[in-house]
Amino acid sequence: MIKHWKRLGLVTGLSLTLVAAGCGADEEGEEGADGDNGDAEETEENGEDADADEDGEAAADYGEEVDYTITGIDGGAGVVQSTEDAIEDYELDEWNVQTSSDAAMIQELDNAYQNEEPIFLTGWTPHWKFQEYDLEILDDPELSYGEAESIHTIAREGLEEDDSDAFQIIDSFEWEESDMEEVMLEIQDDVDEAEAAQNWIDENDDMVSEWTDGVDENAGEGETISLSLVAWDTEIASTNVLAQVLESVGYDVEMNQVEANYVFASVADGDADASTAVWLPHTHADYHEDYQDEYEDLGPNLEEGAQLGLTVPAYMDIESIEDLQEE
């Protein structure tokens, strides 16, 4: 039987082409054409300058409307640190990050979205909110949030020797962004987490059978596997799926919901057997650097399907974090 959420620690691109037509063969005609092109180019440049000014004014207004506040999740999350880095990289001295839970951030988003009010969020994909709301991640030319990431699985040292069947399933677990979002969306629609995971498993038997190939149906009888995770919808989805598969071959599974730092510490110390919740190379880089010699990195369970960034509703007239800079 799966034991849900036993806590082990503190839940801490306008290309414009000018075509000169009807150019005369004499010098006077050429000069006229040149003069016309010059006017057109000047008009284009003036138009671009005007657009840039408008964008800057709109972004400045947004800052005032939201009291220069970015709504974030818990302070230990990598996306919060990346947002603080962005504030420094783009010299957004008046801005700050207000940390909260994922649920509280979504409530703030929903309140703003229903009234088409501006809001800035610490965002990441995959996440069901990008299906529920029309959102955009702002361009980040400074790469404060890094490139697209992968989500890795880590396992405690010695797990393969202690339980090769559990290790095989955990090591083989790998899926796509669309798979994860199916589970996340169903959970968001109030389906029980374990049920949503099992529904996905039932619809993807061919994939799951590759994870369990060669494992006896009673391999885990009498054995317990402990999985650590952070309380993010992505990790709730992946951990529940892996737990259901392990349970299908007899294991009891404990899912331990903890702060991000303790995900790493728990596996490194052997308090947990594994975690599917490691975002690399950016989000959890510091934690991974601290503990990587004390656990086994099994590689991505979701390859380059994860992205962090400053996120806004699509109705807001802003494209880049740079637009928030004061002139």
Image (cartoon, helix red, strand yellow):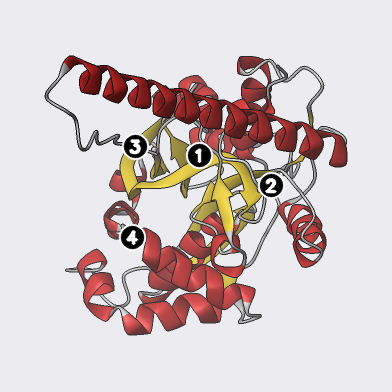
Along the line of sight, which residue is nearer the eye, 292 or 247?
292
Which tag is nearer the camera, tag 3 or tag 1?
3
Q: Amino acid at mark 2?
A: Leu
Residue where numbered disc 4 is placed: 176
Q: Secondary structure at mark 4?
A: loop
Residue 8's label in the rendered image is 2
| Image point (46%, 61%), residue name | 238
Q: Earlier in the sequence, mark 3 or mark 1?
A: 3
Q: Amino acid at mark 3?
A: Ser
Q: Position of residue 203 (x, y in %)?
A: 34, 83
Which tag is nearer the camera, tag 4 or tag 1?
4
Between marks 3 and 4, how big is the CA–CA gap? 35 Å
Q: Secondary structure at mark 2?
A: loop
Residue 267's label in the rendered image is 1
Q: Earlier in the sequence, mark 2 or mark 4?
A: 2
Residue where numbered disc 3 is placed: 15
Report crowding for label 3: few under 14, some 14 to 19, many 20 or more residues within 10 A (C-alpha). Answer: few
Do labels 1 and 2 touch, CB within 8 Å?
Answer: no
Quarter of the image with the N terminus is: bottom right
Q: Position of residue 39 (x, y in %)?
A: 43, 25
Which tag is nearer the camera, tag 3 or tag 4?
3
Between marks 4 and 1, how big is the CA–CA gap? 24 Å
Report crowding for label 4: few under 14, some 14 to 19, many 20 or more residues within 10 A (C-alpha). Answer: few
